[in-house]
Image (cartoon, helix red, strand yellow):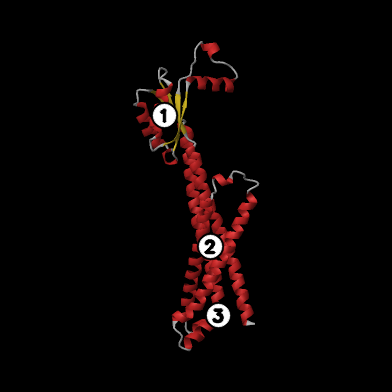
Amino acid sequence: MNKRRHRLQMVTLCISTTMVLVLLGLVVLLGLTAHNLQKNLRENVEISVILNDTLSVESGKALGEIIKTKAYAREVTYISSDDALQTAKTEMGIDPTEFTGFNPFSPELTVKLEAPYANTDSLKQIVKALRQNKKVVDVAYTKDEIEGMNRILDTINIALLALSALLIFICYTLISNSVQLSIYSRRFVIHTMKLVGASWGFIRRPFLKQAITIGLISAILTCIILGGIIYALLPYMPRIETIMTWHELAITAACVFVFGFVIMVLCTLLSVNKFLRMTAGELYKI
């Protein structure tokens, strides 16, 4: 009967630990995915470098190659005045030259930025440096949109950080309570082993082995469940692989295994030590 009860406790502890680790895994995966999504948004920020009308195509492309070597430039595209005119005709449905008598567009370079440089402070320095070039007439970018985007992303980062801290605390508390309840039912076994002269290390050993086993099993089950959730989402989010790669999945799995192992061992150690310090009278009172 005791063995059956012990096995039932292990199964219950494994299930509760798995549920908590699933919650933790979802938080880690959400954080990594949000980071990639923010990176993609910032990498789509671009600035337009308006070039001198007298500049040849070769000179314009050469300047683009120079800019491309800069740390802030992720992608540089040269757009000739004729290309800009053709794009305007397609988008507007009319030919601007019919009204102006000449091509009103200047050649330009479209520069997409690396994510760390997609902020107003960095952009000011970039624009200042580009405007010093004699081949450049002006540099344009949507300052208000970039500032608004960064404000929203900073708010999301703070919210995710607070949510992660809260959920990690909740996860620790739930697992700790489950482990303590499991060891509580065996507190008199611990006391009996003390009476027969067993060392604390010897008493802890079976509990730690059990904790490691449950932690590993729970982590494996968690990874299977998370994999099933992601697989189920694929038909509804066809481009999810662009922000959720194998790199993010591997980090999530590693976090699940590390947290499952560390938290189970830590909680078991604290709980066993607690009962090891108690006398027989104290054990009957709790």
Among numbered discs 2 and 1, the one appearing first in the sequence: 1
Instruction: Specify the label residue 64 is tagged with.
Output: 1
Q: Amino acid at mark 1?
A: Gly
Among numbered discs 1 and 3, the one appearing first in the sequence: 1
Q: Quadrant of residue 47?
A: top left
- Provide residue 106's location: percent of width, then percent of height: 45, 20
Structural distance between the alpha carbons of marks 1 and 3: 73 Å
Q: Please identify the quadrant where the N terminus is shown.
A: bottom right
Question: Quick one: which residue is furthest to the top in this view?
Answer: 101
Q: Quadrant of residue 223?
A: bottom right
Residue at the spot 55% in from the left edge and 11% down from the top edge? 98
- Provide residue 244's location: percent of width, then percent of height: 55, 48
- Dots 2 and 3: beta carbons under 8 Å? no
The residue beneath circle 3 is 186
Can residue 126 be seen here? The reply is yes
Q: Is residue 120 left or right of residue 14?
A: left
Residue at the spot 51% in from the left edge and 76% down from the top edge? 207
- Provide residue 256's location: percent of width, then percent of height: 52, 60
Question: Quick one: which residue is furthest to the bottom in this view?
Answer: 196
The residue beneath circle 2 is 171
- State which mark lies toward you, 2 or 1: 1
Q: Nearer the viewer, residue 206 or 169?
A: 206
Query: From what the image shows, is residue 227 above or below residue 200?
Result: above
